[in-house]
Image (tube, helix red, strand yellow):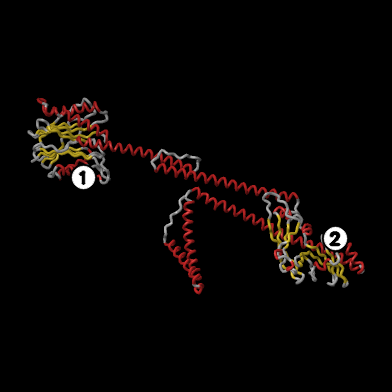
Amino acid sequence: MAWPRFKLNRIDSVLLVLVVLMAVLWLLRSAVSTLEPHLQLIQALLVLFGGFFAVYRLMALGRWVARKLLWRVRHRMIAVFFFVGVLPISLGVLVVAWGVVLLLGPVTAHLITEEFSRQSSRMEAMAAPLLWQLRDLPPADRPAFLLRYHSQSESRFPGLMLQAELDGTTASFPAGSLAGALPSQLPESGGLVRKDDAFFLAAVAQEGSLTERVVAVVPVTSSTLSGIIPGLGILELPQRADAPGEGARPAAALGRPVPVGGGIPAPASVFDWQINWPVQTLVVDPNTGQARPITFLLRTRPSALWQRIFAQETEMTFGLFTVVGYILAALFLGNLLVSFIVALSLTRTLTRAVNDLYVGTGHVNRGDLAYKIDVRGTDQISDLSRSFNAMTASLERLMEDSKRRQQLEAELEIAREVQGRLFPASPPELGDLEALGVCRPARAVSGDFFDYVHLDDGKLAISFGDVSGKGISAALVMASLHSILRTQVSLLSSGGSQGLERAASLVVERANLQLCEGTAPEKFSTLFFGAYDPESGRLTYSNAGHLPPLLLRDGKISRLEINGMIVGAFPHAEYSATSVALESGDILVAYTDGVTEPENAQGEEYGEERLRRAVSHRADQGLQSVIEGVMDDVVRWTGDSPLQDDMTMLVLRRRR
C-alpha cells in the first residue's frame, strides 16, 4: 500500500507559516522579556489555529487510510460485523459483568454493615443481664463476678472488654483495659467506634439513670471479622492522617490501610477473579458524638459473595441457581460461537464471490471470454456467478457471431464489387438509340440484372431480369444467368435464315435449359431478352415471365406482351419472340417488381399506375433523371421504411 503524495496546498502552507511564527515568537520571548505577556497570548492563538488546521489535515489522512483499508469488500464486511456484532456483544458482556458487580457489591456491603449491627445487638444482649446481676451485688463482689462473666463470654466475642458503671463506682475487665482503648465519652447507642487509628465495636446496656450502665467493647481485628464475615475476604481499614501522635510515625505510614480478616478465598474457577469493592458504613466519633460515613475496601471473589448471598438458601436451591447460571452461560457462549461461525461463513461467501467477480471482470477486460467462475452454493450470490458465466458465454458467442458477420460482410463486399463489374460500365452508343440501366439493391448484392452487348453486325442485345429470392443465393443465380446469356448472344448475329425472332427465342430456350441444369428447382428467374436493329429501328424480344415493359409513345403508354414462362423451372419449356418498331421519341421502360410493389405505412402498393405517371411527367428529361426520379418517388412513397426489394430499371429511347 503506497502512502499518499501530499502536495503543499493552502492548509499545509498555513501550518508552515504558523510554525515559523511560533518559532519567531519563542525567540522574541527569550530576547525581550518585557513583551513576554503579549507574546504568550499571540503564541496561544497561533497554537489554537495550528491545532485546528493540524486536526483537519489529520482527518484528511484518516479518510485516505479508511478508503485504502475499506477498499476490499472483505475489510468492509469485517468492519460491519465488528460494529454490528462484536462491539455490541462486547459492550453487552461488559454491561452484564458490571451489572453483576453492581448487584454483588452493594448487597455484600449491606451484609457487612448488617453483620456489624447484628454483632453489636448480640453484645448488647450479653451486657444487659450483666447490668441486672451487678446491681444486686455489693461493690466489693462486682470485680470477681465481672471476671467470671467475661471468661464465659470471651469465646463468643474475642478480645471482649467489659466496664460496669454503678453507684458512682467503675469496674472493668481486664482491669484498666478500656482506660486507653476508648475515648472518654462513648455513644449511648453503641455501634462502630473509632479512636485514632483503632476501630471498636461497642455496645451499651443501660436502664433508667444514665449513670448505671455496662459497656461491652470488641476491637475490630482479623479474628473479629473472621467470626462476623467468615470466608468473605479481607477488609482494609483506613488510617486517619490527623490521628494524635502521628508525628512519631513515619510519614510513609500515614493513611495506609490496615488489612483485617481471614484472607482472600481460593478461586472457584479460572474466571473467579479477585475484585475490590468499597464498603461504606457509619462510624461514631466519641469525641464529637457524631456519626460520619467511612469507606472500607473489601477484597474478595465473586464466588465468596455468591455463597454469602445464598448462605440461607437450601443446597437444592443453590444448586438450581448454579445450574441455571451454567445453562445461561452455555447458551450465551453457544450463541456467540454460532453467530461468529455464521458471520464468518457469510463474510467468506460474499467476499469470495465478489473477489471472483472482480477477477472475472479483469479476464473479460483482457479479452479472455472463456474464463469461468467457480460456482459454489445455491443462493443469490451463486446465481450471480452463474449469470456472469452465462454472460461471458453469450459475449463469446456474440464475438464469434461478430467475427463471422464481419467475414460475411467482407465477402458480401467482394461479391458486391464482383457483381458491380457484371453490370455494364457505361451506357451503349448506338446511333439514334439511348439506353441506360440502374440497379438499387435492397441488400449488399442484388438478384436483379440488366445488360447490353454490341454485336458484330451492329445490333444491340439487351437483357433484363429478376432472380427469385434475395441475397447471396440470388446474386449467384444472377451471375450464372448473366454468363449464360453472354455466351448465347452470338446466336443473334449468326442466325442467318432462321431470322432474328427465332434467334432471340433460341437464346432464351438455351438459357433456360442451362439454368435448370446448373441450379436448384426453386431458383428461377424472369427474363426480358431482346435485340435492336438500328437499320430497321425494330426491337425483337422474348419476355420470359417478366413484368411487361411500358412503351411511351405520343403521351400514351402501352404494355409489351409476355412470350413465355419463367426460366430455370422447366427445362423443356418453349419460348417465342415478338418484334416491335420503335419510332422517334418512343421510350421503353423495363422494371422489376421492386419498383411497383413497395408499400406505404397504410399497406398500399406504389403500383404500375403511379409508375406510368412518374415516367410521363419526366418524358422530356434525360434517362438518368427519369430513372432517379422514379426511384426517389418510390422511396418517398414508402416513407422511412427500408427498401423491401431490389429496384432495377432499364430505359430505352429513340432519339427524335
| Amino acid type of the residue tagged 2 in the rendering | Ser
Count of numbered badges drawn on the protein: 2
Residue 401, image x, y percentages: 35, 38
Name the image quarter holding residue 280.
Answer: bottom right
For the C terminus, the quadrant is top left
SS for callout 2: helix
Circles 1 and 2, Cβ within 8 Å, touching? The answer is no
Q: Could you tell me how far apart the alpha carbons at marks 1 and 2 are, in whole angstroms?
A: 136 Å
SS for callout 1: helix
Residue 278 versus residue 321: which sits nearer the camera? Answer: 278
Mark 2, Cα crowd under 10 Å, few <14 / some 14-19 / many 20+, is some
Image disc number at residue 497? none
Name the image quarter holding residue 450.
Answer: top left
Asked if one can make out residue 464 in the rendered structure from this viewpoint, the answer is: yes
Residue 581, image x, y percentages: 10, 35
Q: Is residue 644 left or right of residue 48?
A: left
Instruction: Please name the residue that numbered disc 2 is placed on.
Output: 153
Instruction: Please name the residue that numbered disc 1 is placed on.
Output: 632
Residue 275, image x, y percentages: 68, 56
Asked if one can make out residue 588 in the rendered structure from this viewpoint, the answer is: no
| Sequence-first disc among 1 and 2 | 2
| Amino acid type of the residue tagged 1 in the rendering | Asp
Name the front one of labels 1 and 2: 2
Residue 538 versus residue 6: which sits nearer the camera? Answer: 6
The residue sitting at the bottom extreme is 34
The residue sitting at the front extreme is 31
Residue 396, image x, y percentages: 38, 39
Who's the residue at 85% across and 67% down the image?
Answer: 176
Q: Is residue 587 left or right of residue 367?
A: left
